Amino acid sequence: MSGNTFGTLFAVTNFGESHGPAIGCVIDGCPPGMALSEADIQGDLDRRRPGTSRHVTQRNEPDAVQILSGVYEGRTTGTPIALLIQNTDQRSKDYGQIAQQFRPGHADFTYWKKYGIRDPRGGGRSSARLTAPMVAAGAVAKKWLFEHYGTVFRGCMAQIGGIEIPFESWEHVPNNPFFAPVADVSRLEEYMDALRKAGDSCGARIRVTASKVPVGLGEPLFDKMDADIAWAMMGINAVKGVEIGAGFASVAQRGTVHGDSITPGGFETNNAGGVLGGITTGQDLDVSIAIKPTSSIISPRQSIDIHNQPVEVVTKGRHDPCVGIRATPIAEAMLALVVMEHALRNRAQCGDVIGAPDPGQSAAEGTSPQASFL
Amino acid sequence: MSGNTFGTLFAVTNFGESHGPAIGCVIDGCPPGMALSEADIQGDLDRRRPGTSRHVTQRNEPDAVQILSGVYEGRTTGTPIALLIQNTDQRSKDYGQIAQQFRPGHADFTYWKKYGIRDPRGGGRSSARLTAPMVAAGAVAKKWLFEHYGTVFRGCMAQIGGIEIPFESWEHVPNNPFFAPVADVSRLEEYMDALRKAGDSCGARIRVTASKVPVGLGEPLFDKMDADIAWAMMGINAVKGVEIGAGFASVAQRGTVHGDSITPGGFETNNAGGVLGGITTGQDLDVSIAIKPTSSIISPRQSIDIHNQPVEVVTKGRHDPCVGIRATPIAEAMLALVVMEHALRNRAQCGDVIGAPDPGQSAAEGTSPQASFL
Amino acid sequence: MSGNTFGTLFAVTNFGESHGPAIGCVIDGCPPGMALSEADIQGDLDRRRPGTSRHVTQRNEPDAVQILSGVYEGRTTGTPIALLIQNTDQRSKDYGQIAQQFRPGHADFTYWKKYGIRDPRGGGRSSARLTAPMVAAGAVAKKWLFEHYGTVFRGCMAQIGGIEIPFESWEHVPNNPFFAPVADVSRLEEYMDALRKAGDSCGARIRVTASKVPVGLGEPLFDKMDADIAWAMMGINAVKGVEIGAGFASVAQRGTVHGDSITPGGFETNNAGGVLGGITTGQDLDVSIAIKPTSSIISPRQSIDIHNQPVEVVTKGRHDPCVGIRATPIAEAMLALVVMEHALRNRAQCGDVIGAPDPGQSAAEGTSPQASFL
Amino acid sequence: MSGNTFGTLFAVTNFGESHGPAIGCVIDGCPPGMALSEADIQGDLDRRRPGTSRHVTQRNEPDAVQILSGVYEGRTTGTPIALLIQNTDQRSKDYGQIAQQFRPGHADFTYWKKYGIRDPRGGGRSSARLTAPMVAAGAVAKKWLFEHYGTVFRGCMAQIGGIEIPFESWEHVPNNPFFAPVADVSRLEEYMDALRKAGDSCGARIRVTASKVPVGLGEPLFDKMDADIAWAMMGINAVKGVEIGAGFASVAQRGTVHGDSITPGGFETNNAGGVLGGITTGQDLDVSIAIKPTSSIISPRQSIDIHNQPVEVVTKGRHDPCVGIRATPIAEAMLALVVMEHALRNRAQCGDVIGAPDPGQSAAEGTSPQASFL
C-alpha cells in the first residue's frame, strides 16, 4: 500500500537503502514444491550488478543473494521466501552537501517534501540499487513460468541516446556490455566514452518480450495485462514512457492495418503486442520503455538547497552515465513478475475453464482445445 | 482483484455490460461531508456520451446517472456511493454471427479463451461503454480535489490518425467535437468524413494534465504516481502507449537538458511531467497516451470462428471510427482517480509531515513552508 | 479498504442504506460458467427477510433480488455480478428526534463522531438490513462450493437469551421461526412474547457449520481460515464473540483431551472445529457466535444528544426484539464467503499440489491421495 | 494475500521458520519522523522470549532485533522498516520421525495436505516462534500510538487451565512469569509444576485492553474495529475464541442492561468493549481470548503417519506446557497493529472531519469538540 509491495498473489515486498546494511525482499505466495537455490537467482543478479564494464557505475558489489526462509531441502514450501543481499561497498563519508541540496531531475526534492526527512546516502531508497531485489524476485517467477508454460523472457537495448540500434539477433545480447542485439557495438562504445568525457548522461530505450505466454491471462477492466505491465515498467527508476505492441505508432495506423488478422494457424502480425482487451492472446508480449538520462552528473546544474536558496549542484561519485544500460534484466524481471501474478490469478478464477492453461504442462504440450492454436 | 476495482482508499468498483439492463459503479472511501448531487457528475458524462456528433457512434444514450447511496441531504456520508446508469438504446437482436467470430484487434478472442463464455452483445464487458462509470467516479474525485487543493484536470486531442494537432489554447477544447485545442477543426472534419466513407478507423493521441497538484503524492518504489498513471491510462480501452513529461523524447535527451533546473521560484521546465522518483513535484502532471484504431470496422477482415475455421469478418452496427475522440474526458477521469487515491494515501502516512498538503486549504492558500514555492 | 468489500478473489462490495432507494452488492471474481439465476439467490433472502413471524420486525420487504450484470444466457461470465434489492417499505417521516440523539448500544454515536454526518433513517448504513446483500452474495458462493466440493452450510439457534437450546436435529431448523434445532419451540415463543411485552430485547447464540470442506484451505500466519471466519462473524451486526470448535471451553481442557486423535479413517473428535494451524482439516467447520441484545428498544434509556445534553431515549418503530433470530442465514452466508475466498486462493497458489482439492469433482468423489481419508 | 502480511496501510510482512537462519518482518507504511531504535522494540521481545522461567520452553534465544532499513539518524524515513532476528538455538538434528508423523492438534497434518511439503524442524512456519516479529512490529505501532494519542496497551492472564484468575491490579503483571494480575501466584506455580510432571499441557484465557483509543476508528460494514481485532487475535497460534466487551455473556443480557448508558461525562459501563457499530467509542478496547492447550506433549497420542498408517506420537523436545503464558505481549502487539492500521485509515478518509482525532496531539490534550467528552 505504501508502494513497496509488488503483486497480490505473488507479492514481493522490497526493503532497504543504497547504503544501509542490506537490501532484500520477501516473496509471499510462491507455489510450493519448486526446486530453488541461490544459484537460480544469482545469474540475473550478475547481469544487473554494477562494476562489470567501464560504461556503468564502478561501485563494486557482488550482490550475493541469501535465501533466509521458504525453502526446505531445496524446494519451496509455499511460505514466504526472504532474500537478503548485503551492501558491501558503501562510501557514505561525505554526504553533507548532497543532503542539503536537490539534484535536478532527482527524487531528492520530492522525498524531502513528502517525508520531511530523507536518507541521502547513495540516493537512499530512491537508488536504482533497489532494483536488485526486484531482479532476484523476478528470477523466481521466471523459473516457475518456464517450468509450467515454457515461458521465456528476453530484453535488449533498442536505442541509446540518439543512436537507434537495429535488431539483429537475441544471440548478441549477452556478448556486449549494452545488452545490444547487434554483433558490433563499437559505435555504442565510442558514444558512451564521449559522453563520459563530457560529464553528461543519456537516455535509452529498452525492448522486452515474453514468449510462450499462456492465452487468457489478465483482467478485463482495470488490471489488464498491459495496464499492469505499464505500471511495472513505469515503476522502474527513470522510466518515462511505455508502449505495448505498435505503441505510439498505432496512432497513425488505420484499423485495417492495426488489427492483427487471425488464421487457423495463429495471428498474422503482432501490433497488439500480445494483449487484446487486457488479456493475453498467446502471442509474444512485446514491450518498449523509455529511460531518461541519469540525473546524477558532474556537469554543474542550477538548483536550490533545503532553505530554498539557489545553489550550483555538481554530483561526484560513482554513477551510471546511462542507467538504461543495466535496465534490461530489470525490465525482464518486472515483466516476469506481472505474468506470474496473472498466471496465479487466472487459475484462481478460471481454473475450471476447459482449455484454460494447465499449470502441469507447458503450453506447447497441452492437450487442451486451444493448445494446437498456440 | 479480478480487475474491476480501481484504487484502494478511493476504491471504485465498476459493473455492467454494454447491453445489460444497467451499468454503474460503487465508490468506497469518499471522504464525508462533501456536497454532491447527480448534477455534479452529469457534466462529464455528457462530454463522454455517444451520439453528440457525426464523428462518433450514433447510439443514443442519455447516460443519466442516479445516486443510490452514500449521500444524505446532499452531502456524502463516508459510506459507499453507488452510481447507476440505465442502458436505454441497446439493439442486440442480431448478435448470432458476431458471437461465433473473433474481430481482429478485438477482445472477442481473449474473453472467449479466458472465460470459456462471453456476452457478445455490443462487446459485452469489453465495450468502451464501461468507461461511463469511470467518468462518473472521476467527477466525484475531481470535485473533492478541486475543493481541497484547487486541482484542475484538462485534456485535449493531440493527434488524430496522421494529423498532429498543435496546442493553441485550452479554450478551444469544448468548442469542437474532437476536444482539439485549436480554433479551426475543418481539416479534422474532412479527415474523419473521408475515413468513415472508406469504412476504416484511425488512432489518436490524447494529452491530459492536472494543475495545482500537491507536492509529495505518490509512493517510492512500486505505486509511483507515474506508475499508477500508466496503469490507469493503459487500462482505458484501446490505449497502447503512455508517456509522462518528455516521455520517449527523453531517450535522446542529455542529462544536462532533461533534468529540470530548480530556482527559488520553482522549476524552470517540466521534462519530468510533474513526477520525480514517483512522487509529485507540485508542477503540472503531463501525460500523453496513444489510442489504437477501432477494431469494429465495416471493411472485411480475415479471421477465424470459434471452431477455428477461417471467416471474413465485417462489423456492421454503430461504432466510433476513432474511439480516441471520446477518450479525453475518460483520461481526465482516470488521472483524477489516481491523484485522489494518492491524496488519501499521503495523508494516511504523511499527515504529520510539516508542510504536508493540508486537506482543509487549497495549495495556493497554504501557509505551509513549501507553499510559497509552489 | 473503507470496510465495504468482503474478500479479495471473491470480492463482494456492499452498498446502500436502510431507507435509501436500494441496497445491493457487486461480486467480482466469480468463476465463469456457473448456472445462476435470481431463483438461486432468493431462497436464502427469504429465510432472512423481515416480517415472517411475530418475533421479528414487522417491516414488510419482499427483498426481491435483481441480477444487473455478469450473467449471460443463464451462466456467469466471470465479470462482476451486480445484485440489486429495492427498498420498498421505508417509513422515514419522523426521524427528527432520532437524528439528534444517540441510542445506547447503537452505532448512532460512533458514526456521528467518525464521519461528522450520518443518515439516521432506519439506522442508515448501520442497519442490519445491509446483511441482505451479504446473504445474496453468500448464496452464490454456496452454489459454487456445493457444485465443486459438495460443501453444505448449516446454521441454527443454540441459545436465546437465558435459554440454552439442545441440538436435536438439523431437520427442525426450517420448521420454526427461530431456526431452532428442536421439535418443540413453545418455550421460546413464550420467552419472546414476554420479552416483547416488557419492551426489552435479548441476545442469542448461533452455531454455524460447513460440511465437506476441502482439506488445505486457509493461510498459515494471518489469513488463517479461523481468523477470517472470526473476522467475518464479528463483522455481522451485534456479534460480540466468536468460537471455533471447542472455543472457550478449550481453556480448561488438557492437551491429552483437546488434540483430536487421528486414525487412518479420519479424526476421532473435532475440538479443532475443522481448522489446525489456520488450515482446514477436512472435518466440519464448527463455529459459534454471540449476538448482543437489540439496542433499539422501547424501554427508556439514559443518553445524550448531539449537543452533549442528557436525554431519555425511547425507540419506537419496527425493530427485532432479538436480532439473533434472523442471524442464522447471515452467519451461513458469511461462512460461505470465507470458504469461497480461500478455495480460490488455494487453487491459485497450491493448484499443483498432488492431492489438492480439484475443482472439477466433489471431495467425496475425488481420486486424489487424501480423498479416501476424507 | 498468502497470509503473511498484516494490515494494508501499516503493513507487516512476516517471514521465517523456527529453525531457519533468521526470522523477521518488513513494516511498510510507518509514518516518517518518529524516533526509533532497536531498544524501543527489544523490551516487548524480551517479555515474549522463551527460557525466562521454568514454566515455558527452555529454548534459549536472545531474540535480539536488528533494524535493516527505514531508519536514518534515529528517525523513521517513511520507507520499509526491515527487522531481523537471528535464530541461534536451533536443534534440528533429529526430526526424522516428526517429519513422518502428524501430531494430534498440530498444523503438521494441514501443512502437509495444503503444500505437499513441510519444514518439520521445530514446527517450521507454524511455530509460535513466528510471533516474535509480530511483537517487534507491534512495538513500533505502540510507540507511534502512544506519542500521538497517549494510547496504552495492556494484557494479563485471566485463566490458566481450570484456574480463573481474579483481576487485582495491572501492577502485578510484570512481577510474575504468568502475566497474572495478582500478587500471589503460588497456586499457578503448583498447577504448572504438576502439569509438567504429568506430561500434559493446558489452555489459557488472556485479556488485553487499549486505553486512550481515539473515537471514530474502524469501518462500518466489514473491516469493523472488532472484526479486525477478532481476525488478529484468532490469527495468534492456538487461539480458539475471541470476545469483545461482554462477549458471550451478552447472550443472556437484556437490552436494558447491555446497552451502555451515556451521560455528558461519558459512558456508564463498557459492555460494548469500546466498539459500537464497528467503530471505537473512545472507551477502552476490552478483548478476551481463549488459547488451547499445547499440542506438542510427551504423553503418547494416537495418530497416523504420512502413509496413513496408525502411529503413537510422543513429542519430545523443548515445548511450552501452556503456550498461553507467553501470549500476553503477543495479544497486545496484535491489538496495537489493528489500532494503528485504523488510525491511518481514519485520517485518510476522515482527516477533514471536525473533531476527528488529530495526529499531532494526544486525545487528552485535544481542543476538538469531542475531546472533553473523552
Image (cartoon, coloured by chain):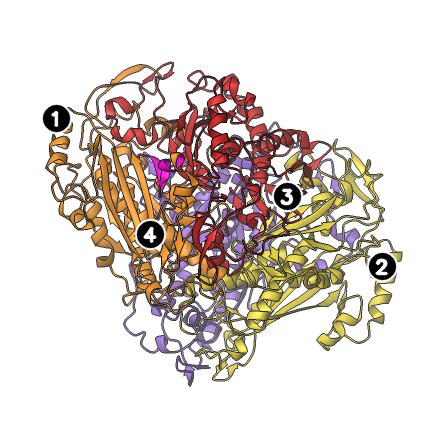
Chain colours: A orange, B red, C yellow, D purple
Say which of marks 1 and 4 sits in front.
4
- Same chain check for tags 3 and 4: no
Q: Is residue D184 above or below residue B32?
A: below
**Could you tell me which chain the residue with mark 4 belongs to?**
A
Tell whether C211 sits left or right of B106. Answer: right
Name the residue that disc number 3 marks: D283
Tell whether A64 sits left or right of B145. Answer: left
Check residue D71 for magenta coloring.
no
Residue sitting farthest toward the right: C197
2 and 1 marks in contact (CB < 8 Å): no
- Same chain check for tags 4 and 2: no
Cα distance in 3D space between marks 2 and 3: 30 Å
Name the residue that disc number 2 marks: C195
> What numbered label is drawn on residue D52?
none
**Residue type marked 3:** Gln
User: Residue at left 28%, top 31%?
Assistant: A292
Q: Secondary structure at mark 3?
A: loop
Name the residue that disc number 4 marks: A284
Q: Residues within 10 Å of mark 4 (few under 14, many from 20)?
A: many
Quadrant position of the C terminus of chain B in the picture:
top left
Q: Nearer the viewer, residue A244 or C347?
A: A244
Q: Which residues are magenta?
A: A238-251
Image position, residue B307 (x, y; %): 47, 63
Say which of marks 3 and 4 sits in front.
4
Image position, residue A361 (x, y; %): 35, 67
Q: Residues within 10 Å of mark 3 (few under 14, many from 20)?
A: many
Q: Is residue C152 in sight in this rendering?
A: yes
Residue B118, located in which quarter of the rendered image? bottom right
Name the residue that disc number 1 marks: A197
**Residue type marked 1:** Lys
